[in-house]
Amino acid sequence: MELKKNPKANVGRNSSLYFAVGLNVMLLLTYVGLEHKTYDKEATKIDVLMVNEQIEEDIPITTINIPLPPPPKQVVTESITIVEDVEDIEETFVESTEIGQDDVIEVRAEVVGIEDVGVAKVEEDIEVPFTVIERVPQFPGCTGNNAELKACFEQKMKEHLQKHFRYPETAREMNIQGKVFVYFLIDKTGKVTKIKTRGPDNLLETEAERIISLLPEMKPGKQRDRAVGVPYSIPINFKLRNE
């Protein structure tokens, strides 16, 4: 005889469902237990009493005396009375203001003597280029004719540059180098003025201007036995050597 099992009598057929329901219920009870908060009733009462006392505190009423604005100024208006002309004047002749050929014009001429006329001498600042001047500016220690003075001047300029040349430290660190063109004027008193520089960087231009400003006072250049200004330009090459 074969035994048949009733499917309704199987107790473990819904065990997974019961397990899931029970697990969710336990998790819900655990969450409620952890999140539940309680407060001390005595502390709450004290807080309420303190708030009530602060609210019931009497605030004194203060009055602010604001002065009244000044009364508006009275504007005095002038009354204008229109008066009608009583007499009508009829113009019969209109005088012209233009000058005709028959009119005589009086001119008062003041006679000025020759001795009263003063002549002021205006000295012009003449500039003659270095290459064409009759006598170039004389550098201290130079002698001879114009050609010898010119050669000596150029030699003294080279010695002056070598003596006072100093490479700017900041330009050395930044590897700044290049050629600076310097223009200056030896005026009619022999002083070096109007120094202008043009180069790749302001540091090199400042150093070139400093070197030229140290030039000594010279004997001024002459054109037709007259002291004149002589412009001169020279390039100064700033170049770093690879050690």
Image: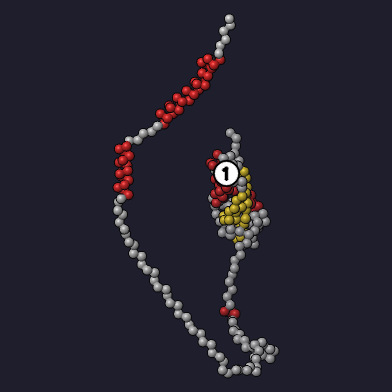
| Farthest right residue in view | 101
- Rendering quarter of residue 38: top left
Task: Identify the residue at horizontal 30%, vertical 38% (top origin).
Answer: 42
With respect to residue 103, does 124 lie above or below?
above
Q: Quadrant of the C terminus?
A: top right
The x, y position of residue 149, in whole percent, is 62, 52
The x, y position of residue 2, in whole percent, is 58, 6
- Rendering quarter of residue 99: bottom right
Mark 1 closeness class: few <14, some 14–19, many ≥20 residues within 10 Å: few
Front-lying residue, 202 or 165: 202
Task: Identify the residue at horizontal 57%, vertical 44% (top origin).
Answer: 162
Front-lying residue, 108 or 19: 19
With respect to residue 115, does 46 lie above or below?
above
Residue under label 1: 162
Q: What is the tally of numbered marks visible in this picture?
A: 1
With respect to residue 49, does 94 lie above or below?
below
Task: Identify the residue at horizontal 40%, vertical 73% (top origin).
Answer: 71
